[in-house]
Image (cartoon, rainbow, N blue to C red):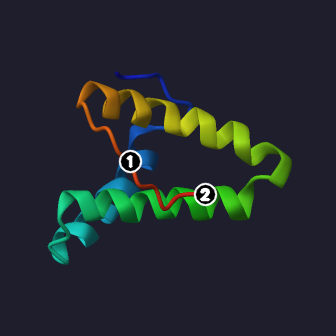
Amino acid sequence: MTQASYYSNERVEKPLYKLINVLEEHRIPTYFSLIILGNMVTNLINTSVAPAQRKPWQDHLLKPCKLLFVKMKIKRIKTYLW
């Protein structure tokens, strides 16, 4: 689902492609890439968001993941985030 962004495509895509290239250079499998990216998100939240605001951020970010797991019929989710 495409959304309009405040930031230019170049500002977003350059760092994104660099991250993707690092994962590809190290031949990181998809599931492990998702774990790494999840840990990056966790680190950003824990270092940049006030403790009182972390739970709403977490809920907002996890909602699409939970919906995807339901759609894929994954019954048991083991999470290392938060």
Circle 1 — which element? loop
Cα distance between the residues tagged 2 and 1: 14 Å
Q: Which quarter of the picture shows residue 71?
A: top left
Circle 2 — which element? loop
Residue 81's x, y, as percent?
A: 53, 58
Please rate how many residues cluster around mark 1, counting C-alpha atoms within 10 Å: few if below 14, some from 14 to 19, many from 20.
Answer: few
60 left or right of 73 in image: right
Which is more toward the observer, 12 or 53? 53
Q: Earlier in the sequence, mark 2 or mark 1?
A: 1
At a point 27% along the width and 38% down the height, the residue shown is 74
Q: Which quarter of the picture shows residue 61?
A: top right
For label 2, the residue is: 82
Q: Is residue 33 visible?
A: yes
Residue 45's x, y, as percent?
A: 66, 55
The quadrant of the picture occupied by the C terminus is: bottom right
Which is more toward the observer, 50 or 10? 50
Position of residue 58 relative to residue 15, above or below, is above
Amino acid type shown at disc 1: Ile
For label 1, the residue is: 77
21 left or right of 56 in image: left
At a point 61% along the width and 36% down the height, the residue shown is 59
Which residue reaches farthest front?
Answer: 75
